[in-house]
Amino acid sequence: MSFQRPIEGWDTSLGFNYTRISIRDRKGNISPQDDQGNALSLSNNGVDNLATVSFSATKDYRDNRLNPTEGSILKLSTEQSISLGLGNVSMNRVEANYSQFKPVKLFKSEKPQVLAVNVQGGTVIGELPPYDTFSLGGTNSDGGYGAGDLSNTRTYVLASAEYRFPVFKALGVGRVVFADYASDLGTSVTVGNKSSGANSKSGTGFGYGAGLRFNCPLGLIRADYGLNDRGESQLHFGIGHRF
């Protein structure tokens, strides 16, 4: 449930969210611990109630919200948990996300070429349930890694750059060359609040690659092939630009 309104050039949103979380094994039985005895929930019975009040403020100067070619967007958000029911969680999640889009012309084309840059980061203050960490790696994160393969963490920073350019104008096909860098700043946690080294997650990584963009009636469909600094590769699919 959320209430939205503009305030002095910012698009703001005040919301309330309630989630009842139960940790279950593959048979559907509640299982508050993993095979090594690490707690998977904050309550002892494997069921948490997570209620939060959130506030976000966005300043959007993009020329197009779906496929921007110039401008910028800044989003700031905070989410505070409140005590309610089982597994009372006391935490505050803070995030900042900034993107800049600049027209460039490295070769002659009728469709615009765009250099897009994104910088974002976040942290959790207070208690951190294992299921509510930031996940680094994947379709909307470091494209050279699979989902969560780089880190599950309390704090993160992520920097991305994309060069977007047209290929077949008549077919609505574009290309993207990208590079990503992500780090958990040494705060990586996994299930049971162990360090990232406990499951061979490095916590910091660099990825790069290329992809295709297809304009269709459903929207912009993307397919990216990424490589990382470990020599591994990933194939990602999604709808819309990553940022």
Image (cartoon, rainbow, N blue to C red):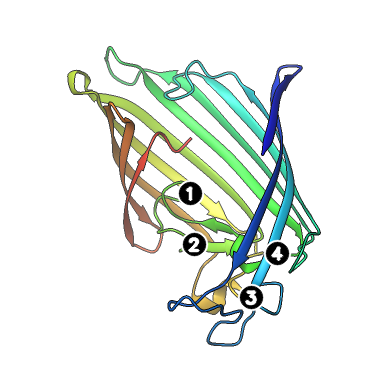
Number of other residues with Cα within 10 Å of mark 4, as a class: few under 14, some 14 to 19, many 20 or more: many
**Residue designated by label 3:** 46
Residue 146 location (% of width, % of height): 40, 59
Give the distance between the C-alpha atoms of the residues marked 2 and 3, in whole angstroms. Answer: 26 Å
**Residue designated by label 4:** 128
Please state which amino acid type lies under the numbered disc 1.
Ser
Identify the mark nearer the N-term, 1 or 3: 3
Residue lying at 59% horizontally and 18% vertically, measured from the top left: 61
Please tell me whether mark 1 sits on a helix, a strand or a loop.
loop
**Residue designated by label 1:** 141
Give the distance between the C-alpha atoms of the residues marked 4 and 3, in whole angstroms. Answer: 15 Å
Q: Is residue 168 left or right of residue 15?
A: left
Q: Are marks 2 and 1 in contact (CB under 8 Å)?
A: yes
Q: Are marks 2 and 3 in contact (CB under 8 Å)?
A: no
Q: Is residue 27 left or right of residue 2?
A: left
Please state which amino acid type lies under the numbered disc 4.
Leu
